[in-house]
Amino acid sequence: MDELELINLTKQAHVAAASGDAPGAIRLFREVLAHQPDNEAALMHLASLVNAPEEKRGYLQRVLALNPYNDDAKALLAELEGRPTDVEAAQGPESDLEILHCDYHPDRETTLRCNKCGKPICTECAIRTPVGYRCPDCVREQQDKFYTATTADILKGAVTTFIGGLLTSLAAFLLILFLGRFLFIGFLAAFFLGPALGGGVAEGVRRAMGKRHARNFPIIGASLFLAGILLVLIPGGALFWGPIALGMAGLFIVLALSTFYARLKF
């Protein structure tokens, strides 16, 4: 993996974490660590995201081995082991909390603040991230750093997606033409070829967009992909196919579409 791909992977991991997608963030940060075992930030994020105490302790110990002065890692490890943190020991008994009003819902009292901008937020607005609770504006700002595609990139991706949909519909026709009469082999081919074609089209779209990302493009792209498929299948008489042929083509298209969407989203 080259440096640019690693940077994009790290951005994806941060966006997933900021948007509350813990499983996705864990998977992506682990992939980052596979290429950069001494990435302190990735280790800290994983320590905040995983639930297993031993796994959490392992990440924190690796952080402290790299940087013995990391106060956040010290505090999390102390909390995990049931010891008072340095801050708690210095503060003594808990002081009275200031009552604030949510910046988005002024009629709601709260004691929470966004840990980045300090804006008061209620529990409905607070978005949990590996580094604490943040307001929707700060989360969106963090996500926007990941969405760097230009208008030209989006247009290239849209055209490539639509063409990919047309090619997928052609593949569905060929599947029915040559394997429609062979029940088992036909469905088996649809099961394997559908995801392969959907993933291939998604990779073509990513390359057409320069591997840059645009907000909501996976949904827009999936809609264009499906439109390209239906534009050929429906006029081509697919609605008059028998139930077996329709089922075979449907399985092929659903798997291609879902794989296409998943590859673009993650």
Image: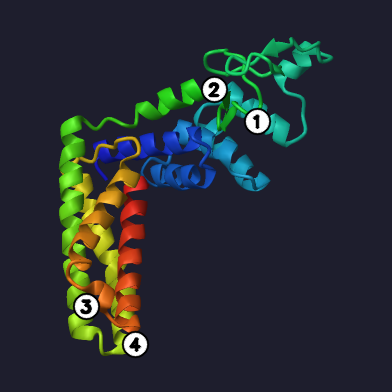
Residue under label 3, please give it: 175
**Amino acid type at image mark 1:** Leu
Q: Quadrant of residue 181?
A: bottom left
**Pointers 3 and 4 in contact (C-beta within 8 Å):** no
**Amino acid type at image mark 4:** Phe
Q: Secondary structure at mark 2?
A: loop
For the question of whether residue 38 can be seen, the reply is no
Q: Is residue 31 left or right of residue 99?
A: left
Dot in front, 1 or 2:
2
**Pointers 4 and 1 in contact (C-beta within 8 Å):** no
Quadrant the N terminus occupies: top left
Q: Secondary structure at mark 4?
A: helix
Measuring from the top left, give residue 7's x and y in whole percent. 31, 35
Q: Residues within 10 Å of mark 3 (few under 14, many from 20)?
A: many
Dot in front, 1 or 3:
3
**Amino acid type at image mark 3:** Leu
Residue under label 2, please give it: 135
**Which residue is more in the foreground, 188 or 58?**
188
Residue under label 4, please give it: 184
Asked if 134 appears above or below 201 in the picture, the reply is above
Residue under label 1, please give it: 76
Cα distance, mark 4 to mark 2? 52 Å
Q: Is residue 19 left or right of residue 109?
A: left
Dot in front, 4 or 1:
4
Q: Earlier in the sequence, mark 2 or mark 3?
A: 2
Cα distance, mark 4 to mark 1? 55 Å
Q: Earlier in the sequence, mark 4 or mark 1?
A: 1
